[in-house]
Image (cartoon, rainbow, N blue to C red):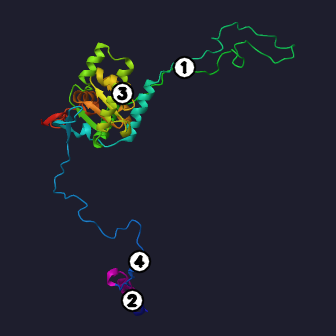
């Protein structure tokens, strides 16, 4: 019995050792390629050089070039270097949406007003007895269900403005400018952006020899031809001009020929204005002031040596 038990134990150990052998030692049946089924996420071929080497230094761009033009010839005058944090931010539609809604809520007047039954003129006495007349019971003539009565749940003066973090709002400004810059729709000109009207026309206009209709007709035709030659007219999406101060000829000309564009002072510009028309034409100084005013999210209260350097703003490369 003992020998038989030892024999059974040795056979069990032998079978266990065979089962513990690696699978690669066992014969495997090859399945034809036509019968194989791969998962949807499986990749048959791996493209070469899809990752960067660890030893290779990562040097992202920190500045972008910006050309300064003369108006209206659009002749390049200088080349400047601007930080990517100013003019090369990625498009964030959510932030732009928050900024546009914030500006719209802030500009709502909220002055709608209607009188309640206690503010309508007249006596508040009961019109007839409660019972005995055979008619419906009524109160005063100021009741909202009567003609000439007060308004029930009518509008009252209120403030529609909402709140938005200052850093998020400033980021939306530079995101809108970056969107225009990346699409080639941000044209920066030299200071003194003005509409060059002919000298003969200015002399006749100052002397009063021309009537109002002739002056407006000439300006409308002149501005239309100029904008068409530059491809800035209505057929190409209109143009928004932004200046630091009010320029008489430019603002008057675009007021008359408003179908081709508009002119705004820097203090009247919002994020929505930077996104509406086909392109933005802005003075160099106005652009600097705009970015300088809306850079609160780039300022850190924690001073770290070598990490708090101000972003590059308008460094001249070629003049």
Asked if residue 167 is among those painted magenta in the image, a careful observer would answer: no
Q: Which mark is residue 220?
A: 3
Q: Secondary structure at mark 4?
A: loop
Mark 2 vs mark 1, CA separation in Å: 98 Å
- Residue 39: name its quadrant: bottom left
Tag in front: 4 or 1: 1
Left of 97 or right of it: where is 286?
left
Mark 4 vs mark 1, CA separation in Å: 72 Å
Q: Position of residue 9 (x, y in %)?
A: 39, 87
Q: Secondary structure at mark 3?
A: helix
Mark 3 vs mark 2, CA separation in Å: 107 Å
Q: Confirm or deny contact between disc 2 and disc 1 (CB under 8 A).
A: no
Which of the marked residues, 4 or 3, is nearer the chain's N terminus?
4
Task: List the residue tagged with mark 1.
Answer: 112
Eyeballing the image, is 101 above or below 84? above
Where does the N terminus fall, quadrant-wise?
Answer: bottom left
Tag in front: 4 or 3: 3
Q: Secondary structure at mark 2?
A: helix
Which of the marked residues, 3 or 1, is nearer the chain's N terminus?
1
Task: List the residue tagged with mark 2.
Answer: 11
Task: List the residue tagged with mark 4.
Answer: 36
Q: Residue at x 37, y 88 (%)?
A: 10
**Over which residues does the magenta segment extend?**
9-25
Mark 4 vs mark 3, CA separation in Å: 73 Å
Tag in front: 2 or 1: 1
* Viewer-proximal residue among 262 and 30: 262
Eyeballing the image, is 201 above or below 119? below
Which of the marked residues, 2 or 4, is nearer the chain's N terminus?
2
């Amino acid at each position: 019995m003992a020998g038989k038990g030892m024999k059974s134990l040795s056979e069990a150990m032998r079978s266990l050792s065979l089962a513990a052998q690696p699978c690669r030692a066992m014969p495997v049946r090859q399945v034809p390629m036509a019968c194989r089924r791969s998962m949807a996420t499986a990749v048959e071929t791996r493209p070469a050089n899809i990752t960067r080497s660890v030893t290779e230094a990562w040097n992202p761009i920190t500045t972008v070039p910006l050309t300064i033009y003369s108006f209206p010839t659009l002749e390049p005058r200088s080349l400047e270097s601007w930080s990517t944090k100013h003019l090369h931010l990625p498009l964030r539609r959510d932030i732009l949406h928050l900024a546009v809604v914030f500006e719209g809520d802030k500009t709502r007047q909220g002055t709608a007003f209607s009188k309640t039954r206690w503010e309508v003129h007249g006596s508040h006495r009961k019109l007839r007895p409660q019972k005995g007349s055979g008619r419906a019971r009524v109160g005063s003539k100021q009741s909202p269900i009567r003609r000439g009565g007060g308004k029930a749940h009518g509008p009252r003066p209120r403030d529609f403005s909402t709140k938005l973090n200052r850093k998020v709002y400033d980021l939306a400004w530079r995101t809108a400018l970056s969107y225009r810059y990346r699409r080639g729709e941000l044209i920066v000109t030299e200071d003194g952006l003005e509409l060059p009207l002919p000298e003969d026309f200015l002399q006749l206009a100052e002397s009063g020899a021309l009537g109002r209709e002739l002056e407006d007709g000439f300006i409308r035709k002149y501005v239309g031809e100029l904008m068409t030659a530059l491809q800035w007219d209505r057929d190409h999406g209109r143009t928004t001009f932004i200046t630091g101060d009010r320029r008489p000829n430019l603002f008057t000309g675009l007021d008359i020929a408003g179908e081709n564009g508009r002119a705004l002072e820097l203090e009247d510009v919002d994020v929505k204005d930077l996104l509406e028309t086909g392109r933005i034409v802005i003075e160099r100084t106005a652009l600097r002031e705009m970015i300088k005013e809306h850079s609160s999210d780039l300022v850190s209260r924690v001073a770290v040596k070598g990490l708090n350097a101000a972003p590059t703003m308008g460094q001249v490369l070629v003049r």
